[in-house]
Image (cartoon, rainbow, N blue to C red):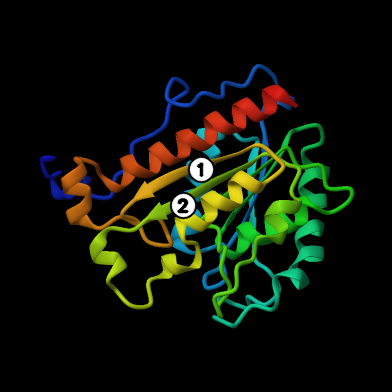
Amino acid sequence: MASSSPPSSKRRRRTLTLEDSPIVSSGKESSPLVVFAHGAGAPSTSDWMIRWKDILGKALHAVEVVTFDYPYISHGKRRAPPKAEKLIEYHKDIIKEAIAKHPGHPLILAGKSMGSRVSCMVACQEGVKASVVVCLGYPLKGMKGALRDETLLELSVPTMFVQVILTQVQLSMKGSKDGLCPLVKLKTVCQKMKTINELHVVDGGDHSLKIGKKHLNERGLTQDEAEDQAANAVAKFVEKSLAGS
């Protein structure tokens, strides 16, 4: 069992170094540009988005990680999002602005939950030349339970999924957010996809990849270490994908 950390270091992140991450930039244009979209329920200024913006930036040695709010997010108010299809054009405009600022850099589209679904839709659009899509908690099922795999089957861009697998305790809980993406169904879709794809599983996490303390102790991990493992898996996939492009 892992020893407990002193209170003063409880929320301290382990900083990823060049040696930790497989991507080491050999020139300005080799550093990827990341456009990172938020989920349905929280804006780009949420603690989760700020933390993962930092994680992705360090792991990928990104020239910039661009975050933004979709128009339905107004002054931090929580409103129901429109259909994902209605967010595509705004997302594309953000990408155009980011590319204009950093021309020549490989484009990585990343997103949390709904943001990952819209990122995949955008990657299928004509004129959008993304090198990789990174999905953090892809919402494979709709609110009414329908399987939404059409966009994934259409993708031609290398795609990385970071998803959770539930513990038996979590499986017994009603209303689990992981119901948005049953892992078995996602694996089946991944096998059908025409593009290169990879899945990194966060054992015992919720839809925001947060792992319960008991499960962390059983695995001898901290939340930061589990997130670093996910980030390094993403970095390795991006490195392979960029090398093959």
Q: Secondary structure at mark 2?
A: strand
- Residue denoted by label 1: 199
Residue 244 % position (x, y): 71, 24
Rounded to the nearest angstrom, the CA distance separating label 2 from label 1 is 7 Å
In the picture provided, is 191 more to the left or to the right than 230? right
Residue 103 % position (x, y): 81, 36
In the picture provided, is 17 more to the left or to the right than 221? right
Q: Residues within 10 Å of mark 1 (few under 14, many from 20)?
A: many
Q: Nearer the viewer, residue 1 or 74?
A: 1
Give the numbered dot on residue 163: 2
Q: Is residue 135 above or below residue 235?
A: below
Q: Quadrant of residue 73?
A: bottom right
Q: Is residue 158 above or below residue 96?
A: above
Question: Would you say residue 5 is visible in this rendering?
Answer: yes
Kind of residue at badge 2: Gln
Kind of residue at badge 1: Leu
Q: Quadrant of residue 178?
A: bottom left
Q: Nearer the viewer, residue 201 or 168?
A: 168
Name the quarter where the C terminus is drawn: top right
Q: Quadrant of residue 157?
A: top right
Q: Secondary structure at mark 1?
A: strand
Give the numbered dot on residue 78: none
Q: Nearer the viewer, residue 138 or 103?
A: 138
Task: Report the residue at 66% width, 37% height from top.
Answer: 196
In the picture provided, is 142 more to the left or to the right than 88? left
Q: Residues within 10 Å of mark 2 (few under 14, many from 20)?
A: many
Q: Are marks 2 and 1 in contact (CB under 8 Å)?
A: yes
